[in-house]
Amino acid sequence: MLRKQVELNKTSMIEREVKKQLDKKRFQHTVAVSYLAAAMAMCHGYDIEKARLAGLLHDAAKCIPPERKIYLCNKYNIQMTEVERSYPALLHAKLGAFLAMKKYNVHDDEIISAILNHTTGKPDMGVLDKIIYIADYIEPNRRRAPRLPEIRQMAFRDMDRALVMILEDTLQFLKDNNGAVDPITQKTYDYYIGQQYGGNHGDNIDTNVKTRV
Ligand SMILES: [Fe+2]
Ligand SMILES: [Fe+2]
């Protein structure tokens, strides 16, 4: 009981601090992801507080200006790819995971992994990785993505199928808009489509560097 109270106090403190670091719109998104992640945790039998905390921290580095993102990665020896140097927005997941540990003193491996992988996904994600990846895409303030009603329903029935729908639409969107892309997104899609259909079912969308930010 006491442990639970301490956890709740820590989450509230982190929420107040995160609010200072984000603009209004990003903070609204963050809170929405946090509570949606908690609801998905209830549905899929995962730790509610951990889901809430991961949601709160997933975009902690989002509002850091691009040059400062690069400066911080250099300063703290965070590896950057050439693509990340060219599109520093892509660094917010890595930097967010770093801030979660260094600034917010959160060291839970599953929370750190969920923050780290929330833009690209990765093959063989853990439950919290999936919750945050999906909640980030479908939270109620999101309006533009196609198939949102179907994906929102699927998120509470079958997370792997929801993942495939999101990855498919993300890859298609980036292809149509010449977006910056991380190859891991394609690998993640191939992995999950293979899980569901035994492979050879994807359209092999041609991607170089794609990601969702
Ligand atoms: Fe993000
Ligand atoms: Fe986000």
Image (cartoon, rainbow, N blue to C red):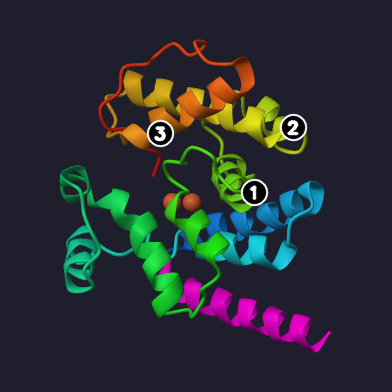
Spot occupied by residue 121 in the image (x, y as percentages of width and height): 47, 41
**Residue with the mark numbered 3:** 185
The earlier-in-sequence mark between 3 and 2 is 2
Q: Residue at x 21, y 54 (%)?
A: 80
Spot occupied by residue 202 in the image (x, y as percentages of width and height): 48, 14
- The amino acid pointed to by label 3 is Thr
The CA span between labels 2 and 1 is: 17 Å
Q: Which residues are magenta?
A: 1-22
| Residue 99 within the magenta-colored segment of the rendering | no
Spot occupied by residue 96 in the image (x, y as percentages of width and height): 40, 63
Ligand 1 within 8 Å of the CB at mark 3 = no
Secondary element under disc 3, as helix, strand or loop, is helix
In screen coordinates, is 64 left or right of 77? right
The CA span between labels 3 and 1 is: 17 Å
| Residue 21 within the magenta-colored segment of the rendering | yes
Q: Residue at x 73, y 33 (%)?
A: 158
Look at the image and tell me in which quarter the C terminus lies. top left
**Residue with the mark numbered 1:** 127
Label 2 neighbour load within 10 Å: few <14, some 14-19, many 20+: few
In the rendered image, the vertical position of residue 52 relative to residue 43, given as above or below: below
The earlier-in-sequence mark between 3 and 1 is 1
Residue 153 disc label:
2
Residue 183 disc label:
none
In the rendered image, the vertical position of residue 11 relative to residue 87, given as above or below: below
In screen coordinates, is 130 left or right of 154? left
Disc 2 or disc 1, which is closer to the eye? 1
Label 1 neighbour load within 10 Å: few <14, some 14-19, many 20+: some
Ligand 2 within 8 Å of the CB at mark 2 = no
The CA span between labels 3 and 2 is: 22 Å
